[in-house]
Amino acid sequence: MASCISLSVGLLFLCMLAGIHGATVKIWGLHARGLVGDPTTHPDAYVKVSCGTISGGMTEFRRDEDDPSWRSQFTLEGVKAGTPLTLEVWDKDLNFDDHLGTCTIPLTYGTHTNKSCYVRTGGTLYYSYTYSY
Ligand SMILES: *[C@@H]1O[C@H](CO)[C@@H](O)[C@H](O)[C@H]1NC(C)=O
């Protein structure tokens, strides 16, 4: 009984923290397989990272690479509960970059490694994240 009460007090405290300060989302391990850009060239791909209105910026470009891996890591703070993670995959071009696809990922508490999502024009994006209060 006592442990039940202290557990729910702990949960309430976590919920209050999340409500006031938002959550922290760390993203790393971004890589992709079989990306498809325009028909004649391999993509120069990069990924833009955001959670709702909080932008994490973007990865570096990987030139002429269908199976790129990015070193960039991201920490987004103050993310409101229920806000999904958005990963946009782009192909850098001289004038207008081509949008290859967007992954909209509902976040759950804890660490999740090497998850995947399909990229609209072809291929798969892999990512890892930690969601914490
Ligand atoms: C991630 O998962 C894919 C598909 O299962 C696998 O091919 C790849 O090697 C994994 N990458 C890492 C870094 O574990």
Image (tube, grey):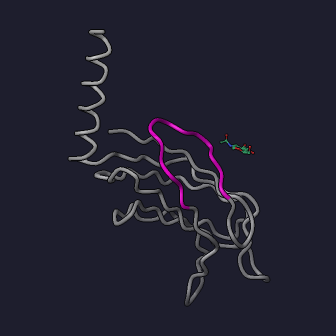
Q: Position of residue 105 (x, y in %)?
A: 53, 55
Residue 2, quarter of the rendered image:
top left
Q: Is residue 118 inside the magenta stretch?
A: no
Q: Position of residue 32 (x, y in %)?
A: 67, 57
80 above or below 111? below
Q: Position of residue 90 (x, y in %)?
A: 58, 73
Q: Position of residue 123 (x, y in %)?
A: 74, 63
Which quarter of the rendering shows the C terminus?
A: top left
- Ligand 1 shows up in which quadrant of the image? top right
Query: In the displayed structure, does residue 30 sit left or right of residue 53?
Result: right
- 84 and 65: which is toward the camera: 84
Q: What is the span of residues highlighted in magenta in the rendered image?
A: 104-117
Q: Residue at x 53, y 52 (%)?
A: 71
- 124 and 32: which is toward the camera: 124
Query: In the displayed structure, does residue 123 sit left or right of residue 28?
Result: right
Q: Residue at x 58, y 62 (%)?
A: 103
Query: In the displayed structure, does residue 95 sit left or right of residue 121?
Result: left
Query: In the displayed structure, does residue 38 sit left or right of residue 106?
Result: right
